[in-house]
Image (cartoon, rainbow, N blue to C red):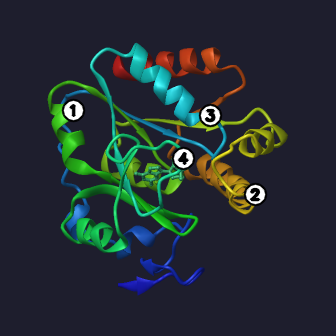
């Protein structure tokens, strides 16, 4: 395994937003998801505090036969998060094993912790015609775009950076330092989403209901292409 040239993190040579790092990934996780006509894979990304989770929650309520993809993460639980429901909280060793065994559709590091999407539940749900909703960061979104180009990818922007700051500060579950770090990540994430071409759909989440309607329309349009 290489070390990240930018931050020294493990697993891959360059950690964030770097094009071409994909070549350093284990071959075993590339190209193994079927592309047959099945359910829809919806990817929602955006900076922390943009309101992705609220949008995803509404999508799951409104889209029949939809399900949430439970990610695995090495970060500790926050607030009222329940293991197996919001995330599966695992050790770095278990995360590494999942990478090595090709169990993750995508994975990325965000603020020092690893996050990844287990592949099998997604394969099964799509095969059963379900709509699967993924809330993942832009690095993960880029990997999904490459492996499953038919996925529907939406990037959620806050109305303004001040709003983002206020939303993050309003969270009671994190330290001020962590909130600042999340805010500092936002510019890079937004720039990447705009420049990478992996997010054909960009919405601004000002009023939740409007955003949900926009995403529902995007899904509807994409499914009938
Ligand atoms: P949080 O710590 O706020 O739950 O998540 C931090 C970031 O990681 C968010 O941008 C969230 O969307 C992203 N994230 C959550 N699960 C996954 C995942 O499975 N893969 C990737 N790549 N990012 C994830």
How much space separates mark 2 and mark 3, taking CA atoms?
A: 19 Å
Residue underneath mark 2: 176
How much space separates mark 4 and mark 3, taking CA atoms?
A: 22 Å
Of callouts 4 and 1, the N-terminal one: 1
Using the image as rendered, state which of residue 179 and residue 21 is in the foreground.
Answer: 179
Using the image as rendered, state which of residue 55 and residue 214 is in the foreground.
Answer: 55
Residue underneath mark 1: 126
How much space separates mark 4 and mark 1, taking CA atoms?
A: 24 Å
- Which one is in front in this view, the residue at disc 4 or the one at disc 2? 2
Mark 2 lies within 8 Å of ligand 1 (Cβ measured): no
How much space separates mark 1 and mark 3, taking CA atoms?
A: 25 Å
User: Element type at marker 4?
Assistant: loop
- Which one is in front in this view, the residue at disc 4 or the one at disc 1? 1
- Which one is in front in this view, the residue at disc 4 or the one at disc 3? 3
Of callouts 4 and 3, the N-terminal one: 3
Residue 114 spot, x, y in % from top left? 44, 64
Which residue is drawn at the image coordinates 73% and 59% (left, top)? Answer: 184
Residue underneath mark 4: 197
Q: What crowding class fits label 3: few (fewer than 14 Cα within 10 Å), some (14-19), or many (20 or more)?
A: many
Which residue is drawn at the image coordinates 39% and 48% (left, top)? Answer: 87
Q: What crowding class fits label 4: few (fewer than 14 Cα within 10 Å), some (14-19), or many (20 or more)?
A: few
Which residue is drawn at the image coordinates 49% and 20% (left, top)? Answer: 58
Residue 223 spot, x, y in % from top left? 35, 21
Residue 41 spot, x, y in % from top left? 33, 34
How much space separates mark 4 and mark 2, taking CA atoms?
A: 33 Å
Residue underneath mark 3: 51
Q: What crowding class fits label 1: few (fewer than 14 Cα within 10 Å), some (14-19), or many (20 or more)?
A: many
Which of the 4 quarters of the picture holds residue 168?
top right
Dots 4, 3 in contact, CB < 8 A: no
Residue 28 spot, x, y in % from top left? 20, 67
Q: Is residue 81 left or right of residue 196?
A: left
């Amino acid at each position: 395994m290489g070390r990240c040239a930018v931050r020294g993190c493990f697993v891959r040579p360059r950690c964030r937003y770097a094009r071409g790092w994909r070549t350093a990934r284990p071959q075993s996780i590339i190209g193994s998801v079927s592309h047959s006509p099945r359910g829809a894979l919806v990817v929602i990304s955006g900076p922390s505090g943009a309101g992705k989770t609220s949008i995803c929650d509404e999508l799951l309520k409104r889209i029949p036969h939809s399900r949430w993809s439970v990610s695995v993460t090495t970060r500790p639980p926050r607030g009222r998060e329940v293991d197996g429901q919001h995330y599966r909280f695992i050790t770095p060793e278990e995360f590494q094993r999942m990478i090595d065994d090709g169990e993750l559709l995508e994975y990325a590091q965000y603020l020092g912790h690893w996050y990844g999407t287990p592949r099998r539940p997604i394969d099964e749900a799509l095969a059963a015609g379900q709509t699967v909703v993924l809330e993942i960061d832009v690095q993960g979104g880029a990997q999904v775009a490459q492996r499953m180009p038919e996925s529907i990818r939406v990037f959620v922007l806050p109305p303004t950076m001040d709003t983002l700051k206020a939303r993050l500060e309003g969270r009671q579950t994190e330290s001020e330092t962590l909130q600042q770090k999340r805010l500092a990540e936002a510019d890079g994430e937004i720039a990447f989403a705009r420049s990478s071409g992996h997010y054909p759909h960009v919405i601004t989440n000002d009023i939740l209901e409007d955003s949900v309607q926009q995403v529902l329309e995007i899904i509807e349009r994409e499914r009938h292409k």
